[in-house]
């Protein structure tokens, strides 16, 4: 089911059609929402409030395709009132035709309703809008490879080990788990995959790309950096990693307390960049880099964390207008090794933004 801020005309049209089926098709039966919910749900009856939310013109709840198929099967024959949902083999030719016709009608209404939701700006969407891929095309998340010498010291990273775990190949694991789960939740019908950069296949490059890690560890990030004029770039010197704003001497470094093996990261610097995929301009590219892995996770969480994603999305819309092309360099606080999600509405969090505000 897809909640949004308010019902669209298409959502209302579907709701009214569902209500008319229950109330008017067999008016003499006086079918209640509770009775219909029991019939549609089978072993797991649907509640009367659920049916009510689908029928209400003031609601924005959209049944799944499977639930609407059950509607079509139920209302294909009045025998459903006593026998429940009948399988195809027990439907007469006339009832089967009615079922096919009604199933197509309800599916068309559902598709129109979903499209109206996907194309609306919905800052109240509990899952956010930034990771919604309305074209329903595949998404590939690309991580750096863990260094071979490190994998060699981990028994389960050896493919010949019976307990081999392929995820030992992946760097940025915390960020990968966070973004993979969120994209799957927002886009339950599309193919979302992840690969280490060494495992990429030719077709992966033309999907929606989410690239984790910088040019020093992720060759795809290096390739993209060479093709794109990124507003900031990551580099390193004798003092460690830093980000530099293009065409300026402005540099931003992470903060560590202590020295050597006793150094503790207290604030990272991370970069989130989104634009068209240069390998396929009809798909999106998102680059996420930081001086350390903690920063990459923090940058990802700006648009996945339940307490901050809608706030940060609204900031993008207000600040950039075009919410699909932007760059933000940010501070990522780290407390006792734990990442604090950056809040873009706090000015001190932001180090550099692109495109610039007109007149600045």
Image: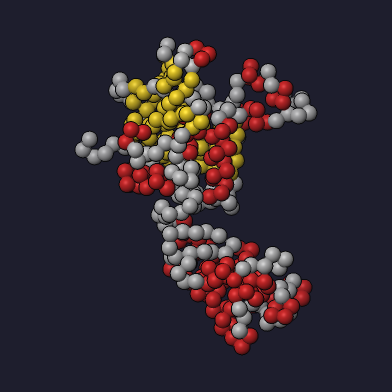
- The quarter in which the C terminus is drawn is top left
Q: Residue furthest front?
A: 336
In the displayed structure, 281 sits above or below 238; it is: below
Residue drawn at the location 78% of the way across and 28% of the way down: 162
Residue drawn at the location 50% of the way across and 27% of the way down: 336
Is residue 210 or residue 251 the one in the foreground? 251
Q: x%, y% of residue 138? A: 56, 45
Q: How many marks?
A: 0
Left/right placement of residue 336 relative to residue 342 reads right
Is residue 353 or residue 247 the one in the foreground? 353
Left/right placement of residue 331 relative to residue 24 reads left
Can residue 351 be seen from the camera position used here? yes
Q: x%, y% of residue 46? A: 64, 67
Left/right placement of residue 2 relative to residue 276 reads right
In the displayed structure, 172 sits above or below 39; it is: above
Can residue 215 be seen from the camera position used here? no
Q: Residue furthest bottom?
A: 28
- The quarter in which the N terminus is drawn is bottom right
In the displayed structure, 318 sits above or below 28; it is: above
Residue drawn at the location 68% of the way across and 73% of the way down: 39
Is residue 240 or residue 118 the one in the foreground? 240
Q: x%, y% of residue 297? A: 50, 33
What colouring does the structure picture have? secondary structure
Instruction: Give residue 139's quadrant in the image.
Output: top right
Q: x%, y% of residue 227? A: 43, 30
Residue drawn at the location 36% of the way across and 33% of the way down: 349
């Amino acid at each position: 089911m897809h909640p949004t801020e308010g019902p669209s005309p298409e959502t209302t049209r579907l709701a009214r059609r569902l209500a008319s089926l229950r109330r008017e098709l067999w008016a003499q039966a006086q079918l209640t929402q509770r009775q219909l919910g029991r019939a549609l749900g089978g072993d797991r009856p649907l509640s009367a409030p659920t049916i009510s939310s689908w029928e209400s013109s003031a609601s924005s709840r959209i049944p799944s395709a499977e639930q609407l198929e059950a509607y079509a099967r139920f209302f294909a024959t009045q025998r459903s009132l006593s026998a429940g949902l009948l399988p195809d083999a027990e439907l007469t030719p006339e009832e089967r035709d009615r079922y096919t016709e009604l199933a197509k009608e309800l599916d068309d209404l559902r598709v129109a309703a979903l499209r109206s939701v996907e194309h609306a700006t919905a800052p109240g969407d509990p899952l956010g809008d930034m990771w919604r891929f309305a074209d329903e095309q595949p998404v590939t998340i690309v991580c750096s490879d863990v260094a071979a010498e490190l994998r060699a010291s981990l028994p389960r990273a050896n493919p010949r080990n019976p307990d081999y775990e392929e995820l030992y190949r992946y760097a940025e694991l915390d960020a990968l788990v966070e973004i993979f789960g969120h994209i799957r939740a927002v886009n339950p019908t599309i193919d979302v995959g992840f690969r280490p950069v060494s495992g990429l296949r030719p077709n992966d490059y033309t999907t929606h790309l989410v690239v984790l890690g910088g040019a020093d560890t992720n060759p795809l990030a290096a390739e993209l950096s060479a093709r794109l004029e990124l507003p900031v770039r990551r580099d390193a010197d004798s003092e460690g990693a830093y980000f530099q704003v293009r065409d300026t001497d402005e540099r931003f470094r992470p903060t560590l307390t202590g020295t050597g093996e006793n150094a503790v990261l207290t604030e990272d610097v991370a970069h989130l960049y989104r634009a068209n995929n240069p390998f396929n301009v009809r798909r999106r590219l998102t680059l996420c880099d930081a001086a350390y892995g903690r920063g990459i996770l923090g940058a990802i969480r700006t648009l996945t964390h339940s307490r901050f994603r809608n706030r940060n999305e609204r900031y993008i819309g207000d600040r950039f207008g075009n919410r699909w092309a932007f760059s933000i360099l940010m501070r990522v606080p780290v407390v006792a090794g734990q990442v604090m999600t950056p809040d873009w509405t706090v000015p001190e969090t932001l180090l550099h933004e692109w495109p610039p505000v007109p007149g600045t």
